């Protein structure tokens, strides 16, 4: 319970930090970017909308703390204002339409790459000094240094344009309308394969290397040696005694890893015109649609924080040491 | 307890024959165990004493065939119940080890998997060797073992971090005797514990051994611990066994001993604290990479003569003792 | 014996000691890493000497494939790809290394000093570190850069450097904590050294390999972030860097027109340069963490020995 409270407190704290960053950035950036934007939209937008933009971005005579209170309240209630790009659609609707795509894409990529990476890491460490252990870490140092956008472009060109195996853009064919029909789901998967592969290939190495190193460390632990002596089978030794413990530190790095994947999905979605949060973020940035951009950044942060929180709860279940108040981690 | 004569006639549980173990290092081979031979008979408790770093654990691991990393058995054999364990296939070894011989590790505090309950780890041991055991039977056996090591059965559902050091150690002992082995090697099983807990564990080990009967190779650097439990005692110095004696003779100042044993004996009160260098023996443990010529103890020995640095003394029998020293008999006169 | 062992693990590791450097060089992976790293560094340093044309010169026939005149062909805008590639190396490597340096300095300051001091200061900075660790950095960098219009290389260096310190700070803090109560630190304290002195002269040298490894990953992250930002057109697209090259080749539809030479070199170079950093880090890892060593040679030797010993038995 104490662990839960502690982690929840941290979740709230980071959420507050993300909102505050959003609030402070346009106000303290040199050159007053918000004012520049608003002047540019003068006369093109409804005066009421302009006024609310001014309030949102600090072009007002209210004291800073008052602006801050209003701002935090609005953010908590999901009142992100109207998108300028999709005027007069509210930012929250744009988010609602794009979030599921990113969750699906980045979520799948994270799950697949972490499972695959962890398994390969276990394998490499177990066959210490063998072929796989020598090659895999080196190969993955290359794959994890590949720029997302570059790999995305290559895959798009080879498997999309040249070979024509996969669609080259969007999340589903324009001829279909969204439903739970198998044909539609198949179509969605078809569209997701190339972007997901891009993210899996680049994210795999981190998981693999982390798991390998933890596993090698764990294989030297006394309880693994003792278990081997007492005659548990190799398979049980590998998974129940070594891997089970080696996984725990990997899990604590999950939040950071997820952040990378989400960052990558901005670039990947932009290459594949995949209508997720990342794609919208780029659109918003290119159109200087600050309300949309702020809303998207916040939702990205919230998603990562939430996923991290869930993993931390899972961690509490997997490591019995944290129940009693967190001996397992700080 | 049996006398040593009746033991001689039985087949030994453990036969170590000319065992030599080295660590291969960048600077050369560290000879951690050197030409060690001895046998252990049913129900016998043998003590093995030596300073920290003298090669006791290395020998124990070699007997268990659990040497890791740079350590190699370069010579000799280890037989358990007549079987050369180095000739077993990995799967044969997995099955044979623990059902016939087991070990309580020096680092028993960390020998339990932090993410499994105590019960699961006991059951794991049982089921790994007896796959046909039902869960219920395994649980019953776990309960039985708990009682044997005097642990409240409700702790079976606990995780290791919830138990005290003494309790963890008792669980490890329970796991070691779970399959009723004929031999249990105990490598400094009480070192990490405070004196009171140490006492009660020692009493328990004796008590359990009397109830379920198995041989023990009890390793320690602590003279008093070993002499109250073991009947026969081996003294190890720089990887070699320099003396076999018995616990009675250790209390008798006048009986024959290796000069190193004498030194250890003079230092008994100091030994309880591991970090204090043994008083009565000048100098420190030798460099195992480059042992002194002849008797490896000679740089620290006050009885040494020319022959000591020229010729390695062999173990020789003196009554019921065996001692490897050129001057055991003549040093009597020097005795103060 | 136990006294000796303890003092050994506590003794100051003098880094970079001769032995440490020798071990580092012995590792094939580290060696490969150094070679690749040096290769790209030389390209960047020698850019003016190496390039036949001005990278912005757009008087050539667009989209010509690699030839003797244009080793890597020309862009859709009629520039020489090779010249752009070489000058781009200069920009991208400088941005990466500088941003990596900034984030490492921040990691050291934020992770090590409060970590060493302990108390409330440590708790506050540790919490801040953990918060920044979970706030996704590329989106944050994108948001910041969008407020700064067409950010030049310097701005990008600072934005990336200022957002990328959290991971390193956490690792360095954890390591600092393990040093706080070591014997040689206590000795230095008793000797009357000030806290800052101890940190700088006793702890930092011991953690140098960890700090260097941090710098390498910081640089790797920075180069990828730079490429990402430029690719989205958030930097100054008239500056020549590997990132802007990707931007122009994508917006110019390089692949659709079959102009692979316009896209492949810079992407491959980023991946290779990043890989060289990670490879060198393997060498460092093995210095600090001998358990990770996977020395196949040793194993082979051991196997042979083993067979011999079995024959003896
Ligand atoms: N991994 C190793 N590499 C090299 N030498 C080792 C290694 N482990 C132990 N040794 C050496 O072997 C000797 C015996 O160690 P050990 O068996 O642990 O002694 P004990 O159990 O009597 O304290 C020690 O002197 C030590 O220097
Ligand atoms: S052989 Fe010589 S040096 Fe060795 S113990 Fe005996 S008297 Fe001392
Ligand atoms: Mg030992």
Image (tube, rainbow, N blue to C red):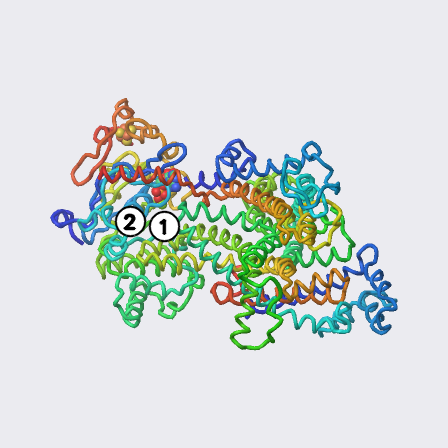
Q: Are marks 2 and 1 on the same chain?
A: yes
Examine the image and state in which quarter residue B268 appears: top left
Q: Position of residue B109 (x, y in %)?
A: 40, 55
**What chain letter is assigned to the residue under label 2?**
B
Mark in the foreground, 2 or 1: 2
Mark 1 Cβ and ligand 3 under 8 Å apart: yes
**What chain letter is assigned to the residue under label 1?**
B
Q: Residue at x 65, y 69 (%)?
A: A98
**Observer-nearest of B330 and A203:** A203
Cα separation between marks 2 and 1: 14 Å
Q: Position of residue B233 (x, y in %)?
A: 25, 44
Q: Residue at x 55, y 77 (%)?
A: A180
**Observer-nearest of A330 and A262:** A262
Q: Is residue C97 left or right of residue A195?
A: right
Q: Which residue is mark 2?
A: B64
- Note whether B106 is above or below A16 in the view shown: above
Q: Is residue A179 left or right of residue A29?
A: left
- Tally of numbered discs: 2
- Note whether B68 is above or below A96 in the view shown: above
Quadrant of image for the C terminus of chain C: top left
Q: Residue at x 30, y 53 (%)?
A: B103
> Label 1 near label 2: C-beta < 8 Å?
no
Q: Position of residue A298 (x, y in %)?
A: 69, 66
């Amino acid at each position: 319970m104490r662990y839960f409270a502690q982690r929840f407190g941290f979740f709230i704290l980071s959420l507050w930090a993300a909102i505050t960053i959003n609030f402070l950035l346009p106000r303290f950036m040199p050159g007053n970017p918000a004012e520049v934007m608003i002047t540019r939209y003068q006369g093109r937008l409804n005066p009421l909308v302009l006024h609310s933009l001014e309030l949102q971005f600090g072009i007002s005579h209210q004291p800073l703390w008052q602006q801050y209170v209003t701002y935090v309240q609005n953010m908590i209630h999901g009142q992100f204002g109207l998108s300028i790009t999709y005027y007069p659609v509210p930012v929250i609707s744009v988010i609602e339409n794009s979030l599921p795509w990113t969750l699906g894409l980045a979520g799948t990529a994270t799950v697949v790459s972490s499972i695959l990476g962890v398994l390969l890491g276990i394998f490499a460490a177990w066959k210490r000094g063998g072929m796989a252990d020598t090659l895999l870490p080196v190969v993955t140092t290359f794959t994890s240094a590949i720029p997302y956008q570059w790999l995305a472009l290559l895959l798009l060109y080879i498997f999309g344009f040249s070979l024509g195996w996969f669609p080259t853009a969007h999340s589903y064919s324009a001829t279909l309308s969204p439903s739970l029909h198998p044909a539609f789901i198949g179509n969605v998967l078809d569209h997701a394969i190339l972007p997901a592969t891009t993210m899996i290939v680049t994210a795999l190495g981190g998981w693999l290397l982390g798991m390998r190193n933890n596993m090698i460390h764990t294989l030297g632990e006394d309880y693994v040696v003792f278990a081997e002596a007492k005659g548990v089978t190799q398979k049980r030794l590998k998974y129940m005694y070594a891997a089970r413990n080696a996984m725990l530190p990997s899990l604590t790095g999950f939040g950071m890893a997820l952040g990378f994947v989400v960052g990558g999905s901005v670039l990947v979605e932009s290459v594949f015109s995949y209508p997720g949060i990342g794609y919208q973020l780029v659109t918003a940035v290119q159109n200087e649609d600050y309300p949309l951009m702020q809303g998207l950044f916040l939702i990205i942060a919230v998603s990562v924080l939430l996923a991290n929180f869930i993993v931390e709860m899972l961690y509490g279940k997997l490591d019995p040491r944290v129940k009693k108040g967190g001996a397992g981690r700080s | 307890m049996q006398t040593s004569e009746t033991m001689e006639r039985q087949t030994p549980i453990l036969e170590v024959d000319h065992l030599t173990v080295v660590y291969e290092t960048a600077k050369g081979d560290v000879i951690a165990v050197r030409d060690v031979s001895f046998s252990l008979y049913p129900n016998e408790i043998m003590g093995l004493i030596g300073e920290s770093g003298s090669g006791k654990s290395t020998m124990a691991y070699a007997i268990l065939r659990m040497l890791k990393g740079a350590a190699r058995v370069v010579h000799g054999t280890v037989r358990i119940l007549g079987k050369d364990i180095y000739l077993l296939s990995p799967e044969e070894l997995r099955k044979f080890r623990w059902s016939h011989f087991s070990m309580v590790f020096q680092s028993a505090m960390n020998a339990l998997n932090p993410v499994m309950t105590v019960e699961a780890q006991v059951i794991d041991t049982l089921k790994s060797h007896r796959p046909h055991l039902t869960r219920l039977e395994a649980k019953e056996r776990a309960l039985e073992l708990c009682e044997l090591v005097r642990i409240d059965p409700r702790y079976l559902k606990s995780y290791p971090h919830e138990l005290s050091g003494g309790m963890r150690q008792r669980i490890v002992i329970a796991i070691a005797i779970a399959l009723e082995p004929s031999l249990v090697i105990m490598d400094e099983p009480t070192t990490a514990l405070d004196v009171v807990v140490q006492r009660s564990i020692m009493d328990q080990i004796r008590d359990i051994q009397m109830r379920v009967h198995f041989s023990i190779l009890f390793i320690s650097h602590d003279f008093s611990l070993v002499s109250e439990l073991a009947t026969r005692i081996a003294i190890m110095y720089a990887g070699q066994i320099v003396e076999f004696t018995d616990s009675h003779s250790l209390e008798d100042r006048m009986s024959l001993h290796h000069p190193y044993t004498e030194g250890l004996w003079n230092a008994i009160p100091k030994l309880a604290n591991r970090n204090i260098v043994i008083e009565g023996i000048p100098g420190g443990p030798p460099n195992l990479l480059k042992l002194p010529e002849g008797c490896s103890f000679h740089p620290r020995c006050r009885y040494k003569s020319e022959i000591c640095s020229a010729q390695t003394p062999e173990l020789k029998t003196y009554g019921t003792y065996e001692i490897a020293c050129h001057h055991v008999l003549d040093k009597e006169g020097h005795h103060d | 014996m136990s006294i000796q062992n303890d003092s050994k693990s506590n003794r100051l590791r003098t880094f970079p000691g001769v032995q440490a450097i020798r071990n580092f060089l012995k590792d094939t992976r580290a060696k490969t890493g150094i070679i690749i790293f040096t290769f790209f560094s030389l390209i960047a340093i020698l850019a003016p000497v190496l390039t036949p044309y001005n990278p912005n010169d757009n008087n050539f026939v667009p989209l010509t494939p690699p030839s003797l005149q244009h080793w890597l062909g020309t862009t859709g805008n009629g520039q020489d790809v090779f010249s752009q590639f070489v000058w781009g190396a200069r920009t991208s490597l400088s941005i990466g290394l500088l941003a990596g340096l900034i984030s490492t300095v921040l990691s050291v300051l934020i992770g090590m000093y409060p970590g060493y001091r302990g108390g409330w200061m440590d708790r506050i900075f540790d919490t801040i570190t953990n918060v920044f660790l979970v706030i996704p950095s590329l989106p944050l960098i994108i948001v910041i850069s969008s407020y700064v219009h067409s950010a030049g290389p310097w701005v990008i260096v600072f934005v990336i450097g200022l957002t990328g310190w959290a991971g390193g700070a956490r690792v360095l803090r954890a390591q600092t904590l393990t040093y706080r109560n070591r014997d040689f630190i206590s000795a230095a304290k008793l000797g009357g050294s000030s806290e800052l002195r101890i940190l700088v002269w006793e702890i930092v040298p011991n953690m140098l390999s960890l700090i260097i490894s941090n710098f390498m990953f910081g640089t790797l992250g920075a180069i990828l972030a730079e490429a990402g930002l430029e690719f989205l057109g958030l930097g100054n697209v008239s500056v020549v860097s590997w990132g802007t090259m990707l931007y122009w080749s994508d917006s110019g539809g390089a692949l659709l027109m079959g102009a692979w030479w316009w896209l492949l070199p810079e992407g491959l170079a980023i991946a290779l340069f990043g890989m060289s950093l990670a490879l060198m880090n393997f060498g460092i890892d093995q210095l600090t963490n001998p358990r990770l060593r996977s020395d196949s040679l040793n194993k082979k030797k051991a196997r042979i020995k083993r067979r011999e010993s079995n024959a003896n038995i």
